[in-house]
Amino acid sequence: MSLGGLTKSGLTSQLANQAASEALSKSSKISPKEQQQVRKLAEDFESIFMDIMFQSMRKTVPKSELAGGGNAEEIFRGMLDSEYAKMMAHQRTSGIANSIEKELLKSMENQAASINSVNAQKVYRTQSLQRPANKAKIDDRSGVQAESMLPGNR
C-alpha cells in the first residue's frame, strides 16, 4: 500500500524512528538547537554514504549500447542518485542516521558531564586551598595561635 510516496512499512519505520528520536531529545540535557544540528549532520552523513553506495552499485551494472546517452546521461544519473540518497536519508529508512545521531548525542552528553565534573573539581580545590579567616585567632584554652599548630609551622 502506498501513501504519498511511502509504503506502509516505510511509514511504520519512519514513525518508529521519529518516536525514538523524540525520546532521545526528552531525556537529553543538550539544547534543542544543538539536537537539531546533530540531526541534520547525521542525515547529511547518511546521504553522503548512500550516494557513494549508489555510485558503487551503478558501476557494477553494464552499460547498454541500445540506449546509450553518453556523458549527459551519466551526469543526470549521478544527480538523480544524489537526490535519491538525500530523500532516503531524510526519511531515515536505513537507520544509519538514527545510529549516528544517538551516538553523537551520547558523546556530547558524556563530554558535558566530564566538563561539569572538571569544573566542580576546580571549584572544590580553590575552596579547600583558601585560608579560613579564623585560623589566626588565638585558642582560648592553650593560648597558642592555631596557625602555629599547622604541620608546616612546627
Image: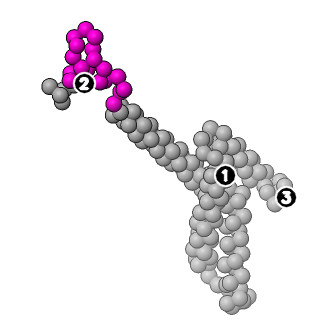
Figure check: 115 above or below 94: above
Left or right, 135 with respect to 60, comes to: left
Identify the mark nearer the N-term, 2 or 1. Answer: 1
Residue at x 72% of width, y 64% of height: 87
Distance between mark 2 and mark 3 Cα atoms: 81 Å
Name the image quarter holding residue 96: bottom right
Among all residues in the image, which is located at the extreme top? 141
Residue at x 35% of width, y 33% of height: 130
Q: Secondary structure at mark 1?
A: helix
- The way the protein has been coloured in the rendering is one colour
Name the image quarter holding residue 137: top left
The residue that disc 1 covers is 33
Q: Are marks 2 and 1 in contact (CB under 8 Å)?
A: no
Where residue 88 sits in the image (x, y, percent)? 69, 62
Q: Which numbered circle lies on residue 97?
A: none
Left or right, 83 with respect to 102, comes to: right
Mark 2 Cα-neighbour bin, 10 Å: few <14, some 14–19, many ≥20: some
Q: Secondary structure at mark 3?
A: loop
The segment highlighted magenta reads 131-149
Q: Secondary structure at mark 2?
A: helix
Identify the mark nearer the N-term, 2 or 3. Answer: 3
The residue that disc 2 covers is 147
